[in-house]
Image (spheres, rainbow, N blue to C red):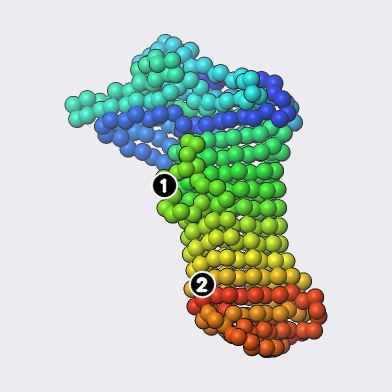
Amino acid sequence: MGQTTKVFTKEIEVAEDATVESNLPSSFGLKMNGTITTNNTKDHYALHGRSNEIRVNIIKDLNIETWDRNFVKQETRITVRTGSEADDAALLEEFKLDLKVGADQRIVVDCNLNMDAFHMKNHIFMDDDCYVKLSNGKRISINFIEIETKLWIPKSINLSVKGNNYAIIRLGELIGDLRLDLEYTEVYGTKMTRLFANLENCYNVVFREVASANISAVNSSIEIENIGGLTIGESGLMKNGITSAFVPSKANSALTKYKIGTVGLLMVMNSDNDAFHANEVGHMDVKNSNYTKFDIGRLNVTAMINAKNCDFNFALIDKDFTNIEVENSLCDLHLYMEESTGYQLQLNRNEYIEFTNNDSSLHLLSNDDNIELYQKGTDNKKGRINITCSRCKLLLDGEQL
């Protein structure tokens, strides 16, 4: 039996500072009772009924292109199969694309038009019984539905995307703010100005360039090639406007992998069991972190660290660094100093530190009340390292001056 497709398109003019709020192609309700199987592929998320026939096929991609025009455009493609071509056409006439500017300059996008939910039930003596429920309460019998949505928005606009369940957002360059409240969603972006994100189980969130970002995440994977300032775990992970109960710890970021190219300021406010990898960091400020691993390719200026049970590996510390302060416990701490680096190192021996010094030109200056002071070089403007660590292993490497 054939199926029928209709493309719904609408374009409206908006102000430069307007805000677009969008859901995802998978945001409509799925009400199932009986035998159901799913098929989650790279591009599609399909639901099968008792006969193993596909009943719902969600195109996972939500492509959001940006342009210089002050217009928002939505294009939604819906394919249905009922009992006949006439019934297909009648059903498609029930779908409405409602895209308009509200009194507060907000434009609300529904990727699924006015479809509220898809219902299916079956049992051993009954084949699949399916219908769609529209936002006006109307119910219409259906055998199959497929939905795909694309958006075009101005670069200057603010964008907010909320949703869950197996979607992929592909986003062009954005000058306005980007807010993400997502679960089980991938995001691929280019150049952003300001990013605010609450993420759960989002295993690919990738951006090329971001001016500043504030992220709370759990069980996710985030990759940013170049960022000016990155704040992690400043606020509690939110879901539907309230703090999520799913978070496995009291931290605002947990079980998440962060892969960063270069970052001017990395600020970690609250982190548990995360993993950070950064090629280059200008300034680093860790306020509160537990059982998190930090792997830093190069530190240029400062690192202020307050942590517990967190390993830190600094593969290279710039010769012009100014200050490193570490309070930690039960950890491995590796510092590799750049060639010709002159500095002072202070160790608090009131706590047990297993210190391995592979920098032969670092000499002990004093040992007063279990405070050991080491120095390399004679420059009075040298950088300073102050370490207070309980039951830690400190490995220090460096080249000869």
Which quarter of the figure has residue 90? top left
Of the residues shown, which amino acid type is indicated by label 1?
Answer: Phe
Dot 2 or dot 1: first in sequence order is 1
Q: Is residue 30 left or right of residue 376?
A: left
Can see residue 185?
no
In this view, the residue farthest toward the front is 369
SS state under label 1: loop
Pick the quarter of the image with the C terminus.
bottom right
Q: Which label lies toward us, 2 or 1?
A: 2
- The answer to the question of whether label 2 and label 1 lie on touching residues, with beta carbons closer than 8 A, is no
The percent coordinates of residue 319 (x first, y second) are 75, 74
Numbered marks: total: 2
In this view, the residue farthest toward the left is 125
Pick the quarter of the image with the N terminus.
top left
Q: Is residue 260 above or below residue 147?
A: below
Q: Is residue 202 above or below residue 359?
A: above
The percent coordinates of residue 298 (x first, y second) are 68, 67
Q: Mark 2 packing: few (<14 Cα in 10 Å), some, or many (20+)?
A: many
The residue that disc 1 covers is: 246
The percent coordinates of residue 349 (x first, y second) are 57, 82
Q: Residue at x 48, y 12 (%)?
A: 93
Of 360 and 131, nearer the camera is 360
Which quarter of the figure has residue 142? top left
Of the residues shown, which amino acid type is indicated by label 2?
Answer: Ser
Q: Which mark is residue 329?
A: 2
Q: Residue at x 73, y 28 (%)?
A: 16
Q: Is residue 217 above or below residue 82?
A: below
- Cα–Cα span, label 2 and label 1: 28 Å
